[in-house]
Image (cartoon, grey):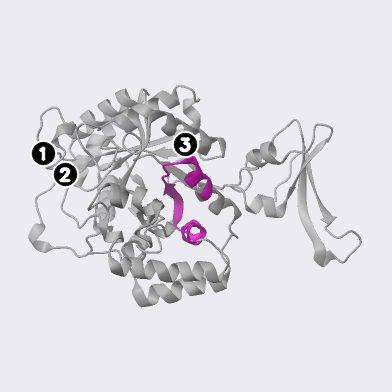
């Protein structure tokens, strides 16, 4: 571990006087100075939590504590150092009140999370009456925060015939310069900020299979806005200082490659991130070939994994349809919503993962979140919660579950995956 003028590394015997096999590496820091993040670990946070009584001159951290601290990763080619957890906000304004939203945001950021993700269409399920509330709730919270300490990510909607209310014209949404400009201007106003750190295309302008659809249907092909034209729309806003970086969401390898080549050929901004669904129930779409395209040695595009708990399925709460947790869950609040996870086969495979978790003394949440956390290609996991208790459980799963998961746990996960692949597909 790196040292500084205010710290010194030393070995302390756990069982005084015994052999070196019972020693643990620790580091101590002067109480008056919190150590900076080291190796992507937020020791400053631990400093606040783990300090000794006021009479102590030193704060002591064990190697184990360091391993359990929240980590930070560089997002693609950007200079954004993003926490391995990003707070998802899509329930704010429908399932969560403004007060609850503020409690969730504060809890997350007080524990080292430095990024939040929203979208112009939020909250979800989308409807005209509630559209934009999520941003308004975030804005009122942002007033109390140093803006430069918050990585704010939002999304411009892709092609849509259903959410035409998002545009003043009332026309079908497209990912062209005019739509991008209007989307960003409205987002900035709602969020009450001068700039967006990461602007993402929520879903492509062209036809692609989305949200549980798995197979590309050639008959659904339609003309789309050229990739270079899309990037020129983003370039305008970057030049104006209203957007720092751009990314994509719900994208395919074809889209990633076309955008990368268009950026290179035209001297246009390159995407730095991709926000796609990724969990123990949804792996194939990313692992088969997107992983190769996004690899750091290829195009270096960071994965922001959304739905690492598969819409709540991997909490196990929907396995008992009569439980209070299931009744209060969004699958039941919004019939038809994310039904791909509520199908019998997905539930059957979820039960098998639950058995793996129990076998190794873990909760299903710990198993699911640690699995995504440990994937080398995941930059950050987007986690949403409707209560502080849920958020606490999720954050604790990152910080307290053994890192990385032991080989025998991973082996059991892979055993199930090889037999069932992705059950949450149409």
Q: Are marks 1 and 3 in contact (CB under 8 Å)?
A: no
Residue 261 visible (yes or no): yes
Closer to us: 367 or 352: 352
* Disc 1 from disc 3: Cα separation: 34 Å
Q: Nearer the viewer, mark 1 or mark 3?
A: 3
Horizontal arrangement in the rendering, residue 419 relative to residue 393 (left or right): left
- Residue that numbered label 3 is attached to: 104
Residue at x-position 42% and y-position 46%:
77
Callout 3–callout 2 Cβ contact below 8 Å = no
Residue at x 53% of width, y 68% of height? 358
Classify mark 2: residues with Cα within 10 Å, few (<14), some (14-19) or many (20+): many
Position of the C terminus by quadrant: bottom left
Q: Upstream in the sequence, badge 1 or badge 3? A: 3
Q: Which residue is mark 1?
A: 172
Q: Secondary structure at mark 2?
A: loop
Q: Residue furthest right?
A: 17
Mark 1 in CB contact with mark 2 (< 8 angstroms) = yes
Disc on res. 375: none
Residue 91, percent from left and from top: 35, 40
Instruction: Give left or right: position of 257 versus 52.
Output: left
Secondary-structure class at tag 1: loop
Q: Earlier in the sequence, mark 1 or mark 2?
A: 2
Numbered range of the magenta stretch = 364-393
User: Does residue 344 sit above or below 175 in this rendering?
Assistant: below
**Closer to the camera, 111 or 327?**
327
Q: How many marks?
A: 3
Indicate which disc, 3 or 2, sits on the residue closer to the N terminus: 3
Q: Residue at x 39, y 76 (%)?
A: 418
Whole-Å distance between the Cαs marked 3 and 2?
Answer: 31 Å
In the rendered image, which residue does mark 2 sit on?
159
Callout in the foreground (3, 2): 3
In the image, residue 270 sits, relative to residue 341, either above or below, namely above
């Amino acid at each position: 571990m790196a040292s500084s003028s205010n710290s010194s590394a030393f070995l302390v015997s756990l069982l005084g006087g015994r052999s070196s096999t019972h020693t643990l590496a620790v580091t101590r820091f002067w109480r008056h100075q919190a150590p900076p993040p080291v190796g992507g670990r937020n020791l400053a946070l631990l400093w606040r939590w783990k300090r000794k009584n006021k009479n102590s001159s030193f704060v002591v951290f064990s190697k184990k504590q360091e391993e359990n601290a929240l980590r930070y990763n560089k997002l693609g080619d950007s200079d954004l150092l993003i926490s391995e957890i990003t707070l998802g906000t899509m329930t704010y304004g429908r399932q969560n009140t403004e007060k609850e939203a503020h409690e969730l945001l504060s809890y997350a950021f007080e524990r080292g999370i430095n990024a939040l993700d929203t979208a112009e269409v939020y909250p979800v399920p989308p409807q005209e009456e509630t559209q934009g509330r999520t941003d308004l709730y975030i804005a009122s919270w942002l007033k109390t925060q140093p803006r430069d300490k918050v990585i704010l990510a939002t999304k411009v909607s892709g092609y849509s015939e259903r959410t035409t209310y998002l545009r003043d014209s009332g026309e079908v949404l497209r990912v062209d310069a005019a739509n991008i400009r209007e989307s960003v201007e409205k987002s900035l106003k709602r969020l009450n900020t001068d700039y967006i750190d990461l602007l993402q295309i929520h879903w492509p302008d062209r036809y692609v299979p989305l949200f549980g659809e798995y197979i590309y249907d050639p008959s659904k092909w339609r003309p789309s806005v050229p990739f270079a034209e899309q990037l020129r729309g983003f370039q305008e806003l970057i030049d104006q200082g209203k957007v720092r970086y751009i990314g994509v969401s719900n994208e395919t390898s074809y889209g990633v490659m076309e955008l990368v080549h268009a950026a290179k050929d035209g001297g246009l901004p390159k995407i730095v991130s991709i926000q796609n669904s990724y969990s123990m129930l949804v792996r194939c779409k990313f692992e088969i070939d997107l992983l190769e395209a996004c690899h750091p040695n290829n195009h270096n595009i960071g994965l922001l994994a959304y739905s690492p708990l598969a819409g709540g399925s991997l909490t196990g709460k929907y396995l008992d349809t009569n439980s209070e947790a299931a009744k209060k869950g969004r699958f039941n609040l919004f019939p038809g919503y994310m039904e791909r996870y509520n199908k019998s086969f997905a539930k059957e495979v979820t039960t098998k993962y639950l058995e793996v978790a129990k076998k190794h003394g873990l909760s299903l949440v710990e198993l699911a979140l640690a699995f995504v956390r440990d994937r080398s290609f995941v930059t950050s996991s987007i986690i949403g919660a409707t209560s502080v208790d849920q958020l606490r459980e999720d954050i604790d799963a990152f910080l307290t579950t053994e890192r990385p998961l032991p080989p025998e746990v991973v082996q059991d996960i892979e055993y199930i995956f090889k037999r069932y692949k992705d059950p949450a597909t149409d």
